[in-house]
Amino acid sequence: SQQGEEDPQALSIQEGENATMNCSYKTSINNLQWYRQNSGRGLVHLILIRSNEREKHSGRLRVTLDTSKKSSSLLITASRAADTASYFCATDAWEGAQKLVFGQGTRLTINP
Amino acid sequence: EAQVTQNPRYLITVTGKKLTVTCSQNMNHEYMSWYRQDPGLGLRQIYYSMNVEVTDKGDVPEGYKVSRKEKRNFPLILESPSPNQTSLYFCASSKLAGGPISNYEQYFGPGTRLTVT
């Protein structure tokens, strides 16, 4: 089952610009998480937003959640070369499931 | 240091030769899971375990086995590997102390790159 779908699949921007990536999902969720993966490495948790929250910040990261549209966005401000990575959203597979489902990810490239 | 370890990190094997990929965590986490990652398909869950002796199928369990005899270990067994199991495999763990799994941050291992010829 594919719950989270990221958009775009790939994004290339200049260092210092902001990067926005989106995630859509199909069923009701309890929480939505975002992860980062550097090439070929394990995923690293970035931020968790609960279904009753609309926006959350962590450093240069800003996450929004719109449960009516079943979508979330991750904004990285003032991007740096080190932000080059793939970004994944993860949600409950379905209500009551003890499974997370990850999207296919957005591959972000920051050009110096 | 809190971590999830996987071994081996790289493995090239032949069709039909049984193999085990080990996963161990030192955070006393209840929940452990295995994922495979393939280009264009993202991360797909193979099996998960909510505690010792409790395992359940994920989205792509065919051809794999797991066991959870101890809280810290969750090995992935390929009884008869085939070329379509060539992939990058990740083990992950998290707390599970009431409520949905999405309440909890997943900690991922470094990955095992498996090639089956």
Image (cartoon, coloured by chain):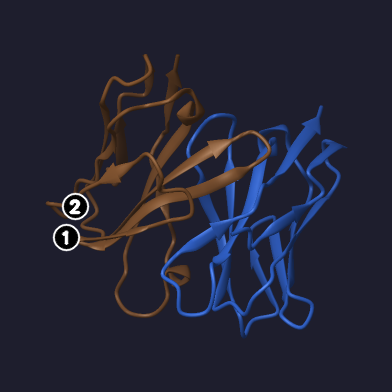
Chain colours: A blue, B brown
Instruction: Name the residue beneath numbered marker 1.
Output: B53
Foreground pick, B3 / A60: B3
Q: Position of residue B103 (x, y in %)?
A: 45, 72
Q: Quick check: A90 left or right of A79?
A: left
Q: Residue at x 78, y 44 (%)?
A: A9
Q: Position of residue B97 (x, y in %)?
A: 29, 74
The answer to the question of whether label 2 and label 1 lie on touching residues, with beta carbons closer than 8 A, is: yes
Q: Do circles 2 and 1 both sit on a common chain? A: yes
Q: Quick check: A65 left or right of B46?
A: right
- Look at the numbered disc 2 and give the secondary structure of its residue: loop
Q: Quadrant of the N terminus of chain B?
A: top left
Q: Residue at x 20, y 49 (%)?
A: B67
Foreground pick, A95 / B24: A95
Q: Amino acid at mark 1?
A: Glu
Which circle's residue, 2 or 1, is located before the other in the chain?
A: 1
Q: Is residue A96 above or below residue B1?
A: below
Instruction: Name the residue beneath numbered marker 2.
Output: B68
Q: Chain of mark 2?
A: B
Q: CA distance from mark 2 to mark 1?
A: 5 Å
Q: Residue at x 54, y 38 (%)?
A: B37
